[in-house]
Image: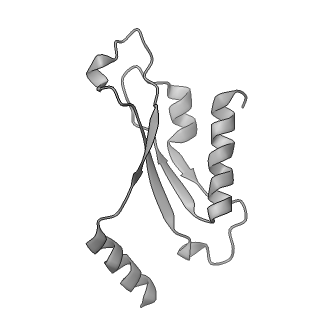
Amino acid sequence: MTGPNAVLTLCLHSLSTIINMRIRSVYPNVPGGNDDLRKRLDRIFSPLDIQSNAAIISTITILWTNTKPISSHSTSSMWMPDCVIPLLLKPDVCKQVIVDKIL
């Protein structure tokens, strides 16, 4: 594991450990995409030191995307993400999740 892809993977593992949350990284399966990068980033990164209460560790979800429409990428050029979007629960879903955890 070398290069910028390895650094990005280590950064996500480190961030997960720092914030003590799982990070679900969603890398879309896009025609012309980088399969190696997708294998490394389309997964869940967990904190390195998960306490015994692993069941209550929260998960945040991020989506890798590109600001250009998929149709603008030709098959000769590789699709690469250029930004990350946090995927958030709807407020009513968040309230129910909190209530479920309390009960």
Please name the colour scheme applied to the rendered image. one colour
In the depicted structure, whether residue 17 falls above or below residue 56: above
Which residue, as the protein is rendered here, is positioned at the far bottom? 103
Query: Residue 88 is drawn in which quadrant?
Result: bottom left
Image x and y of residue 37, in percent? 55, 31
Image x and y of residue 9, in percent? 64, 41
Indicate left or right for 29 with 43 as reference: left
* The C terminus - image quarter: bottom left
Image x and y of residue 59, in percent? 50, 63
Image x and y of residue 13, in percent? 66, 51
- In this rendering, the count of numbered labels is 0
Viewer-nearest residue: 56 or 70? 70
Indicate left or right for 5 with 99 as reference: right
Query: Residue 2 is drawn in which quadrant?
Result: top right
Which residue is rendered at x = 56% and y = 71% of the image? 57
Viewer-nearest residue: 82 or 54? 82
